[in-house]
Image: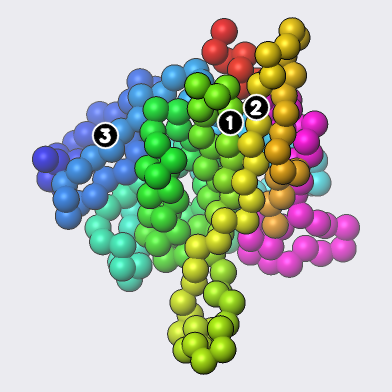
């Protein structure tokens, strides 16, 4: 039972690497926290680094702002209630998303003790609480029993119109869309090898930077080889 005043005090006290606020719901007065481990940090930070390297490699370092685990407060007209959240890794275009109340366009959430359902609740919160300012949510889940990492890429889009259905385009209703599921499995080999189901991870340029790509610009793609490198880094974090 955490009231808003207590939350403000906790928020100040937890600015340390041992504890991270994940999400706070003022209505239910429930506070979710994360105690970071090497595995948890590796799961989200290594993939964010690979995305950042591509952004910087295209000369867009001055047009991108890393927001990391910045606290974002629910937008008043979002309909998501009163609360706040911190992503594991996040970022957005600069100067479009500069400022203390700005939301990222990309959020990455990782989990190994949490269920997939819990991670998807986080994803729904980010898209709703930001009033759709967040454009892409990556969910990364580690399954110890299967020696497996799954990556889900979630976005929002206008639903496909069915014959006789109400026109949603005019009402602005957006639907959740699971664009990609990538599964990375560690094989029982020495040295370790990995099997990847699905293809490269694709992040649309227009959703990250809020504009269409210009001449010489295109979507950001993490190849199968880069995903294998990511998986090796995650498994190394476990010792």
**Image vertical order of residue 158 relative to residue 69, above or below:** below
Quarter of the figure with the N terminus: top left
Disc 2 from disc 1: Cα separation: 6 Å
Q: How crowded is mark 1: few (under 14 residues within 10 Å), some or many (20 or more)?
A: many
Task: Tell me the tag on residue 12.
Answer: 3
Q: Position of residue 128 (x, y in %)?
A: 40, 62
Q: Nearer the viewer, mark 3 or mark 1?
A: 1
Location of residue 20 by image quarter: top left
Q: Which residue is drawn at 19% across and 36% down?
A: 9
For image coordinates 58% across by 31% down, the residue present is: 149
Cβ–Cβ under 8 Å for marks 2 and 1: yes
Q: Where is residue 106 in the image (x, y as percent from the top left)?
A: 56, 50
Q: Seen in the image, is 79 located left or right of residue 206?
A: left
In front of the other: label 2 or label 3?
A: 2
What residue sits right under mark 1 in the picture? 149
Q: In this view, does 122 lie above or below 234?
A: below
In the rendered image, residue 137, in percent from the top left (x then y), is placed at: 53, 50
Q: What SS does tag 1 mark?
A: strand
Q: Which residues are the magenta region?
A: 205-231
In the picture of the structure, the residue carrying the numbered disc 2 is: 185
């Amino acid at each position: 039972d955490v009231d808003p005043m207590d939350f403000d005090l906790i928020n100040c006290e937890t600015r340390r690497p041992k504890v991270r606020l994940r999400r706070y719901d003022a209505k239910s007065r429930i506070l979710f926290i994360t105690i970071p481990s090497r595995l948890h940090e590796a799961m989200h930070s290594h993939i964010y680094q690979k995305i950042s390297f591509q952004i910087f490699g295209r000369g867009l370092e001055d047009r991108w702002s890393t927001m990391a685990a910045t606290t974002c407060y629910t937008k008043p007209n979002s309909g998501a209630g009163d609360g706040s959240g911190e992503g594991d890794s996040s970022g957005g275009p600069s100067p479009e998303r500069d400022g203390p109340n700005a939301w990222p366009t990309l959020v990455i959430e990782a989990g190994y003790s949490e269920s997939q359902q819990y991670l998807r609740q986080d994803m729904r919160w980010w898209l709703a609480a930001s009033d759709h300012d967040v454009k892409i949510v990556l969910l990364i889940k580690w399954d110890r029993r299967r020696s497996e990492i799954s990556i889900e890429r979630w976005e929002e889009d206008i639903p496909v119109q069915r014959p006789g259905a109400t026109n949603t385009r005019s009402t602005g209703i957006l639907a959740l869309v699971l664009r990609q599921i990538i599964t990375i499995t560690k094989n029982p080999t020495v040295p370790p090898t990995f099997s990847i189901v699905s293809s490269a991870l694709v992040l649309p340029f227009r959703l990250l930077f809020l504009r269409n790509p210009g001449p010489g610009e295109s979507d950001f793609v993490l190849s199968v080889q880069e995903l294998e490198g990511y998986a090796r880094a995650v498994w190394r974090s476990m010792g």
